[in-house]
Image (cartoon, rainbow, N blue to C red):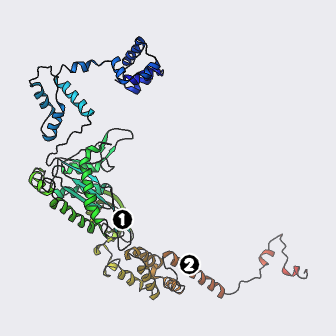
Amino acid sequence: MDYQTIMSMLFKHRTYDEITSSVGCSRRDIAAVKKTISTRGITADRFAAMTAADIEKLFPDGRRTMSADYADPHFAQILEEMKHNRFFKLQQGWVKYVAGTSTQKKYSYSQYCALFNRFAATNDVVATLQHEPGKAMFVDWAGPTMQVLDTVTGETFKAYFFVASLPFSGLIFCKAFSDMKQHAWNEAHVNALEFIGGVVQMIVPDNAATATHRRKRGDKEVVVTKAYRQLAEHYQTAIVPARSNRPRDKAHVERRVQTVETRIIGYLDSQTWTSFEELNDAVTERLEDINENLRRVNQTTRREVFDAEEAPVLQPLPKQRYEDVDYKQLKVGRNYHVTSDYQHYSVPYQLAGKVLSARITTTRISLFDGQSKVCEHPRKHGRRGQYSTELAHAPKHHQDVQGLWTRDWFLSNARSYGPATVQVITQILDRNKVEAHAFLSCRNILTELGRKKSPSLEEACQEMLNINGYPNYTALKRVMATLAEAKKQQEYASGPAAQNTKNLEPMQNIPGAFVRDADHYKGRG
């Protein structure tokens, strides 16, 4: 009990409620201190001159005098035993203590445990975790990132590194991903389990948003996310997240992350990487060096310990690989393609304009019209705007063109309008770094502006070439409107002049009406 603080607050005239909330004592303790101050006649000046030893004498602890009558439990030795023997339990230490030859009194088991916990807290002792083979896999994202350059578009993307480690053998897995979203998080776990060739009893993640969440703000209960729980159920393993603000819970993976930062990212960061496949191939080479060539203090490699002691106790991988499943409603465009995640997939042209259900996994996208399956495509990844087109989905008048929605396909359509249209379509295709990015613009020009093979498209393209303009759908549409207006003006100018003499006979025949003719106004200046 912090009697010195209680006395100080009493001399400052603080209330009992304020003292109990600040010190964490009971009202009875405060009353006892107040009584001691009163009976001993202690004033504020005298209290200011008192030392900690003087205050301790005022409130003697009977437990300390009693402890001299009990045998020393030697907790320091117990701690050393627990560090070197992972099977040693505190109860074993108490049994040895009770069976000792000392004639002094012995603590009961509950007192023994309470005193041991107090000793550990006082000496800032951290319990040593004895890891078992095949029991746990620690996972986390590394802090540093790298740059991946797309040489086609010139864009740069961040590479995030997922790290997984088995604490018993120290085996490390690492792979680079383009983001840290739920799909990448789950895919990284699948790759890690396939890398070690089995399933551990539990996975220990950090409290990332892709791993855990709270049901509502302020709630202390931590819940595993639905997608992450589905993965755990598929592999028949448990998710045991590390506690918030408890870095010691995941100290092992933090050390492995440092290994990745120094021995993988540190080696590869100075080079230029043009794709994630190329980067991950280099990461695999570095992992092989860490796991199979780097010998530790005991002259063993991580792979040797894993193969000898950990691999045999892992649970087998399920026969079917886990895949994230997502469902979407996608509308079929006029080009009989649906778009998902900026990639395009063809369907039979008869379904243009309909809304289809899409079942999307990591590797495939399946399209359904009601309950019937329409088609299935390998899922496109990487650069946006890729097309997966089956020629059988196109109408017959498109199938005679080899390579639907290609450069040749658009130029073949442009020739039916004229050479100026061909030249404009060529310019649009050439000025895009990724040629496919110009396909939609070309399609709009040829099908919308050139509807019913209108000759005005060829005229507009020729006018755009004459003025050395920047051809696109909007510019050509304006030129076509300008040319159409000019034709109307020309037709109006070449027609007969309008009659300016008005026939007044019908008005003059109206009963009771008198209309003056033009002669009436002559000569009035």
The extreme right residue here reads 524
Residue 503 x %, y %: 77, 80
Residue plotted at (14% across, 37% down) = 81
Mark 1 or 2: in front is 1
Proximity of marks 1 and 2: CB atoms separated by less than 8 Å: no
State the image quarter where residue 147 is shown: bottom left
Answer few, some or many: residues within 10 Å of disc 2's Cα (few below 14, many 20 plus, some between 14 and 19): few
Q: Is residue 399 visible?
A: yes
User: How many numbered circles does the render carry?
Assistant: 2
Answer few, some or many: residues within 10 Å of disc 1's Cα (few below 14, many 20 plus, some between 14 and 19): some
**Position of 271 compared to 313: left or right?**
right
The extreme top residue here reads 39
Quadrant position of the N terminus in the picture:
top left
Residue 408 x %, y %: 35, 83
Q: Is residue 361 visible?
A: no
Q: Any mark on residue 205, and which? A: none
Badge 1 amino acid: Phe
Residue plotted at (33% across, 60% down) = 145
- Disc 1 and disc 2: Cα gap in Å? 43 Å
Instruction: Between residue 351 and residue 138, name the one nearer to us.
Output: 138
Residue carrying label 2: 481
Q: Any mark on residue 157, and which? A: 1
**Position of 376 compared to 25: left or right?**
left
Instruction: Between residue 70 and residue 234, name the one nearer to us.
Output: 70
Badge 2 amino acid: Ala
Q: Is residue 519 above or below residue 125?
A: below
Asked which secondary structure carries label 2, the reply is: helix
Quadrant position of the C terminus in the picture:
bottom right
